[in-house]
Amino acid sequence: MNKKKPEIAQIFLSPPHLTGAEQYFIQQALTSNWIAPLGPHVDAFENEIVDYVGGGEAVAVSSGTAAIHLSLALLNLEPGDKVFCSTLTFIASANPILYERAIPVFIDSEPDSWNMSPQALERALREADQQNTLPKAVIVVNLYGQSAKYAEILALCQHYDITVIEDAAESLGATYKGQASGTFGRFGIYSFNGNKIITTSGGGMLISQDKAAIQKARFLSAQARDPAPYYQHSRVGYNYRLSNILAGIGRGQLETLDERVKKRRTIFATYAQELSALPGVHFMKELEHARSNRWLTALTIEEEQAGLSPGELIAGLATENIEARHVWKPLHLQPLFKDARFYPHEEGRSVSEALFECGLCLPSGSNLSSDDQARVIHAIKRLSHLSGEKRVKSKIG
Ligand SMILES: *Cc1c(COP(=O)(O)O)cnc(C)c1O
């Protein structure tokens, strides 16, 4: 009869990984009837993050995007002000620039870290300086858990006195020269979205050494309510605070962050060991003096040598119920930003476009079992081998 093939379990790119400790904190929130916005878990979660990254002040919010928006809202942008942003990133890095009616300018990647090219940034700043259109902020992204080249980037931004916003949504738990990712800019932001290294199901955090700025962010995140005996508001505010229940989930998750980083690094190392020998395959490097959290294992595959494109590999894996993804499509190539200015790494050479063409991310969740990772590795080897055979045949034939 029509016996159905047993479904092979889906392997996801980066699913949530619960620890068990969340239940305790959620229960506390429920028992104390403190599930509404704010509450003791929110305060504790903020303090624990600050402790983890080695100091500063923090405000917990409803998403990483909200944290980026608040950091820009603190800068009192005027419509038409410029904000520079890494181009190779998720759209959430740049959407808040539009919320503030500012104009994004996109900066290319450099090949070592895949992050913002100091070379391109220098050119963009020099030109902007000449035209008297220096940006109000530079949003620097740490892609897939890897820190950008902060020594160079901070020196440039200091020279022109520009605020740095560090989008560390993907890099919580990573370090650069021993210092925690997210603490390099004047503002740092983390995301606790469901696919990130730790999650509150949805949430984010804004951190800074500037206590007054965080106080202001806290005010803006709760509808900008003036200190008055009635509801009074003098400027636009937002409803961005994190709920006490979700902060409880975050506290449970944070306890295991170091283990999660270790596991994701092991997953990366295993892929690299098993797949580096395939023709045309190169894994994302790790900067010297930096330790990535390896949020996602990212690699490039050169079609000419490998015999298949990232798209073909992703489609091949999908037929085996394995979720792989292209690397982010650069923002300067997005229809939304078609009119935005873009500064390539070198004149005539866009590193981000090349990475988009040949890059992909493999399943990297910290709860990926070694059997499941072996399934992914086996599938990739098989697909690569098949395309190799096809090529040999077409040469002979
Ligand atoms: C996930 C992510 C964000 C946004 O975080 P949310 O919590 O989903 O709003 C911002 N920037 C980058 C680079 C991200 O990966």
Image (cartoon, grey):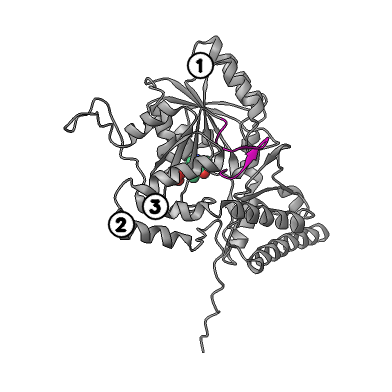
Q: Residue at x 69, y 56 (%)?
A: 266
Q: Is mark 1 within 8 Å of ligand 1?
A: no
Q: Residue at x 28, y 35 (%)?
A: 223
- Compare residues 149 and 244 and report the one nearer the observer: 244
**Considering the image in quadrants, where does the C terminus appear?**
bottom right
Mark 3 or 2, closer to the camera: 2
Q: Is residue 235 above or below residue 282?
A: above
In this orientation, does residue 329 appear? no
- Compare residues 180 and 366 and report the one nearer the observer: 180
Q: Which residues are magenta?
A: 171-184
Mark 1 or 3, closer to the camera: 3
Q: Does residue 284 appear to the left or right of 203 in the view shown?
A: right
Question: Residue 178 colored magenta?
Answer: yes
Q: Residue at x 55, y 34 (%)?
A: 183
Quarter of image, res 358: top right
Q: Decide: few, some or many residues near mark 3? Use Cα within 10 Å; few <14, some 14-19, many ≥20.
A: many
SS type, badge 2: loop
| Residue type for callout 3 | Leu
Residue 346 x %, y %? 67, 25
Q: CA distance from mark 3 to mark 2?
A: 15 Å
The image's mark for residue 246 is 3
Q: Which residue is denoted by mark 1 in the rendering?
A: 134
Q: CA distance from mark 1 to mark 2?
A: 50 Å
Q: Which circle's residue, 3 or 2, is located before the other in the chain? A: 2
Q: Decide: few, some or many residues near mark 2? Use Cα within 10 Å; few <14, some 14-19, many ≥20.
A: few
Mark 1 or 2, closer to the camera: 2
| Residue type for callout 2 | Ser
Q: Which circle's residue, 1 or 3, is located before the other in the chain? A: 1
Residue 269 x %, y %? 72, 54
Q: Which residue is denoted by mark 2 in the rendering?
A: 32
Q: Is mark 3 within 8 Å of ligand 1?
A: no
